[in-house]
Image (cartoon, grey):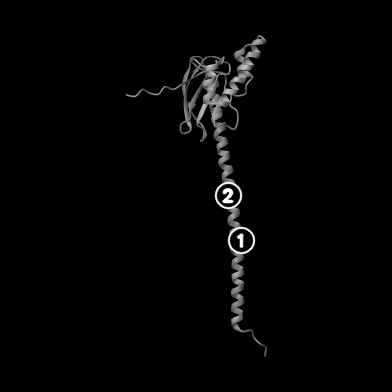
Amino acid sequence: MEEQCPRGKNVSSNRRGMVIGMVFVYILVGITFALVLIFGYQAISGFLQSSEEVAFVQFKTDLENSIKRLSTEYGSVRIEVYTTPLGYEKVCFVDLGYENIPGEIQDLCEQDQYACAVWEDAAEAQQEALSQGKDPRAAGHEDVAENVFLQPLGPVKIKVSPIRFADKGFHCENVVQGTFTLRLEGLGASTKISPIESPAEP
């Protein structure tokens, strides 16, 4: 008669096998969970970045189109509300054809150092055009690649058609909860930008 293994030994080795199997299952579950977290985080980050890029392109397109369209409609006035992607605090517009006066450029430098440096580049282009007998106002606008500046800096440069202001060479607007409002007036070949006056307190 064949000798049979004691029953206790079978149960013990079965339990040991189950424990080892469970350890491998837990390791596999842990690795799967970690991979899901990593790839899920990357996917969500990519999605958020893409949505921010789309929002910025939409803002840039709306701004450029509305200013360009109004520049040809002499005497037309519109109030425009613009929506920026979240995270932007201020937007500055610079008339690159304006003869920058030292005091004014200093005011802009206090509000936006980068815009100030670009305006100085435009001033150099104006001086060079003047020495060659060309139109300095046109040179200032044509020779510089941007005239709208966001804080913090946007991912791409923004340049709208020629802009003017009432009595200076720039205008800065605070962005509040992702929006700002401007008064635009068509001047025929350019667009005049003015701030919206706050209603007087009763």
Instruction: Name the quadrant containing residue 96.
Output: top right
How crowded pointer 2 is (Cα within 10 Å; few <14, some 14-19, many 20+) is rated as: few
Which residue is situated farthest in the bottom direction here? Answer: 1
Instruction: Name the quadrant containing residue 196.
Output: top left
Q: Could you say whether the residue bearing mark 1 is in a helix, strand or loop?
A: helix
Q: Residue visible at 60% across and 75% down?
A: 14
**20 left or right, relative to 110:** right
Instruction: Identify the residue under disc 1.
Output: 28
How crowded pointer 1 is (Cα within 10 Å; few <14, some 14-19, many 20+) is rated as: few
Task: Give the mark nearest the N terminus, 2 or 1.
Answer: 1
Q: Residue visible at 61% across and 13% down?
A: 136
- From the viewer's side, name the closer residue of 89 and 21: 89
**Given the image, on which type of amino acid does mark 1 rest?**
Leu
The reply to whether residue 72 is visible in this rendering is no
Which residue is situated farthest in the top direction here? Answer: 133
**176 left or right, relative to 43:** left
**Given the image, on which type of amino acid does mark 2 rest?**
Gly
Could you say which disc has been placed on residue 40 in the image? 2
Q: Residue visible at 54% across and 29% down?
A: 150
